[in-house]
Every structure is written in structure tokens, then in C-alpha cells.
Amino acid sequence: MNGLNAIYPKRGLPFHVSDYPKKVQALLHQKLAPVDAIVQGLPRRFRFYSTFAMSQARGLLRAMAQRDDWEDVLFYCAMLLEPYQFLRHPNVHITNAYFSPIDRFIAEKMHKSVVHLPRQFVQFGDTIQKDGIIDTIVHTVTPPDEEGYVNLGVNCEILWEAL
């Protein structure tokens, strides 16, 4: 492994499981699921963390608006990239490590309270590691390399701590 993804050497290329060796294809078929299926499989009550800014799983967070049966969802984040529509739901609660323009928009235009939990980036990892704080971590990764490994990107240190 030389640090370069031989299957997807540059960004923006379509992702095809068939491009991988058979062993990795089997792993991908076992691990991958369509976003809609993931959203439909989420419990109505859960606590989750979506990683810092550019590593947020925007497709999943956007798709969560398909559901309106949330009973108690606690969403921990650090610097939102957009005002995801699922945040409008009255049973979805937001705790953010940074109070950004998006948070102000959510508070002013979507009429939602955003709990501000001021932390340095590395301190937020300590917070979400506590028992009972989160059930799930949502994060984007690169397409797998030829051996099935993915790159966790710029947020790998907080993600690793939270795992």
C-alpha cells in the first residue's frame, strides 16, 4: 500500500463495487447499504454525533428529513455545513461545539434552540466519549482502496477517540 488509492486515484469518480477484487467486493456488499435504507432503519430515539464540518455525512443528514416519526433525537455536532431539514422536527435537539452562522440561522429562521457546548476540537472528543452521551457516530470516508481500507479524513483524531 503506497498511500495512493489505485482504484479511485482522484476525487469525483463514480463508485462501483465491481471495480474491487472479489474479497473486497464481499466486504463492501456486507458493509454498504443505501442511504434511504439506513435512514429507515434508524430508531425513533437515539443520540448521535456527526463529525466536524467537511466530514459530515451530508447525504445521510439530508435524507433524515424523509422521516417525521422522530421521538427523541439528540444531535451532537461541531460546525454544521448546512441547516439540515430534519432539524426542524420538534423532537430533534441540537448540541453544537461551535456557534456558527448556520447555528444562528437555525435559531432565527427555523426557530430551534441550539445548545452551545463550547469546547476546543480535541475537548469535544472527551465530551462525547462519556457513557450515555451518544449511540452512533456519522462520518464520511473515502472510497476504499484495493485492500478495502478507507481514509477517515481530517477528523480522524476525534473519531478515533469517540470509537
Image (cartoon, helix red, strand yellow):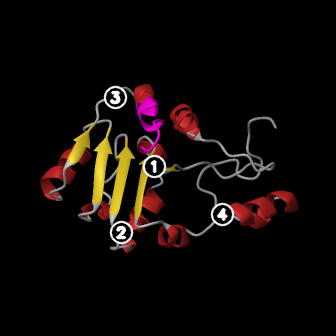
Residue at mark 3: 119
Residue 108 x, y percent position in the rendering: 13, 52
113 lies left or right of 23: left
Residue 80 x, y percent position in the rendering: 34, 46
Task: Return the disc, 1 or 2, that comes first in the chain's sequence.
Answer: 1
| Residue type, mark 4 in image | Leu
Residue at mark 4: 32
Residue at mark 2: 65
Residue ID at (82%, 38%): 1
Q: Is residue 89 above or below residue 51?
A: below
Residue ID at (38%, 73%): 67
Give the magenta range: 124-133
**Dot 2 alpha-carbon crowd within 10 angstroms: few under 14, some 14 to 19, many 20 or more:** some
Q: What whole-number distance in Å separates the C-alpha atoms at marks 1 and 4?
A: 17 Å
82 lies left or right of 27: left
The extreme front residue here reads 131
